Amino acid sequence: MARRTFNSIESTADQAEALVQQGRWGDAERHYRELIGQTHVINYEYDDWLRRLGEIYRHLGRQREASFVYLYLHYFDMARGQLVADEHLGLRARLAEIEKKWTEAAQLYQQAKLPVHAAVSFERAKQFTEATAAWKALVHSAGLGQRPYEAALIHFNYGLAAVRLEAGSSEARRALIESQRKLEQVADDFEQAGELERAFDCFQILLKLGKESAQFENLAEGYVNCIRVLRDDNLKFYVLQYYEDFIKLALERSELHAAATLYQEAAAFAARAGLPYDRHYQHKSALTWMRCAERFTETGVPVQMTENALLAAASQHSAVGDYPAVRECFEKLAGLELPDRAKKRFSTIAARYKGLAAPPVELPGLPDYLKQQHAYADIWFVDLLEWEMDGDPYAVAASIVGDLRYPNGIRRRALVVLLTLADAQTRKQEGDTETLVHVAELLGELQSYAALSPLEKLFAAQDPVIRRAAVRALRFLYFKRSFVIVRKALADPDAQVREAALVAIGGLHFPHAFNPLARIYRESADPRVRTSALQSIGKIQTVEAGEFLVMVLRQETGNLREAAYQSLAQMDNADVLPILRQHHEIETNPQVRETLGELLRRH
């Protein structure tokens, strides 16, 4: 990423130290600020610069800036010593939060008029009485009228907090029912708008609700919808992971019928997706159907339910070639209290499998290295905290700079954002176009999801120069949410903002970007936009991207066909070759067939 150039790190560091020795603190500060803009250097050198910069800020009487530096360094006592004025309550709360002094953080956040931050801190302090009161106070917040998603989250958090205090609370139950209703509606709205990842967030919260309430129906609804969204988004391994999690919960709750059915669904999905795990899931389904039949026999349910379970087990065993197990199923069927005609038929079928061996082939399941540990992000807190920060780049950067969950490079860039904003405030230029353009550039360089909210706010500016900077910054932010701004920018009245959107599209090529890019291609009537989307899709290198490009090559003409051709020619994915071969065989247009043949020869 481009930065303002200077002679060299070594010469700048020497000059900076010489200025310190001369007591020229202002000049020294400018030199050290140049140095800490070099966020790639090794830790000990960077930390040395910061220690000196913190000292300089104290000499200059810039206590807040010194506290930023010490917060990054985790010199908590020194940072706290700089924040004595009431205007720094929010920063003092952030400092207490990083030290995991949750109660102190909550109280300071309350004084700083940050009620969501206070409620979350009370939750983490396990002070449930205070947390419940804090969430309840937020239920009727004036700002929620036009924010249905945030309203749903607040009802959700209030309901869960109240249940912890009084399990049978009717008020808590009403809050949870209201949150479920709102989340289902908001999820539907997000899906209609094509924002599948936001709909997915809603369904994950419904999952949390199901787990907390121990209601299998709620759990099932959450999982079914999560799986559907992930499937629509072509995230194959995530789909199987969610199936596995759902099956595990179903088995833990002895929901054997549901688990057996889910194994079958997972097998069907794996087969459609070309993944080699379908036989594993079929085998698991067969075993679970047999357990289900045993349970039905023990509990005295109608015999037809046991019959159906054993027939399903036999079908799944047959699919994997386990014929002794098929025979066992039909022998059990013959022993049920069924009409004589049916029993005789099942006995006859069982006899046909006598002497057939089980297959020696192993049935591999989803390997552990493809599974993610499902510590789901607490988005019911995270998204509300984002809402309260309201896209303020200062608040967002302050939330990152001391948080060791972020890599050092991101924390360093967050510190640069804070100091840049502090400089502008000192000059009373924080709202100037030049400042906001620079802040947008720095937010892009954060390469963090947290940067999107302030960039969205900057994109709402009246000044097209600021909007353009916000859009250009997106080219470093590889998140599907980035496309929310990109799509708006493509329809912006300012030509340069639209041009910036093209630059952003050119930089946003990552696996999860396929669906948003394909949607931009389908929705746009601008050939340049469609060509840019195709070029980025070609760089994704997935099978889905290859299939899409082949479709474009076959259906379009002129520059779009050429763009699809060039993208396919540069793809380096052997799994795309069978797709090319298949379409080459069935293509009736001689020109397209020749083009597909040429691509096959090149690969």
Image: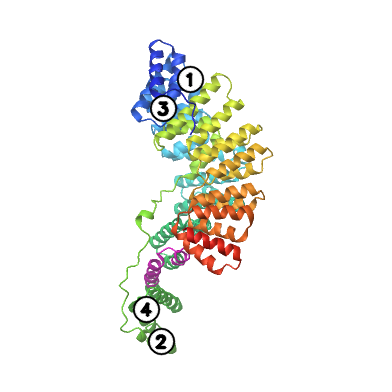
The secondary structure type at the circle numbered 1 is loop
Q: Would residue 278 be counted in the magenta stretch?
A: yes
Q: Which residues are magenta?
A: 267-291
Q: Residue at x 59, y 44 (%)?
A: 484
Q: For the residue marked with disc 3, what is the amino acid? A: Leu
Q: For the residue marked with disc 2, what is the amino acid? A: Lys
Q: What residue would you read off at disc 2?
A: 343
Q: Which of disc 3 and disc 2 is earlier in sequence?
A: 3
Residue 530 horizontal/vertical position (percent): 61, 50
Q: Is residue 60 visible?
A: no
Q: For the residue marked with disc 1, what is the amino acid? A: Ala
Please identify, in this view, whether the residue under mark 4 or under mark 1 is nearer the observer: 4
**10 Å crowding of disc 1: few (<14), some (14-19), many (20+):** few
Q: Is residue 376 left or right of residue 461?
A: left
Q: Quadrant of residue 271?
A: bottom left
Q: What's the distance in space between the residues labelled 2 and 4, CA to CA?
A: 16 Å
- Residue 71 numbered tag: 3
Q: Is residue 103 left or right of residue 486?
A: left
Between residue 144 and residue 346, name the one nearer to us: 346
The vertical placement of 411 against 490, above or below, is: above
The secondary structure type at the circle numbered 4 is helix
Q: What's the distance in space between the residues labelled 4 and 3, CA to CA?
A: 66 Å
- Residue 85 numbered tag: 1
Between residue 598 and residue 124, name the one nearer to us: 598
Q: For the residue marked with disc 4, what is the amino acid? A: Val
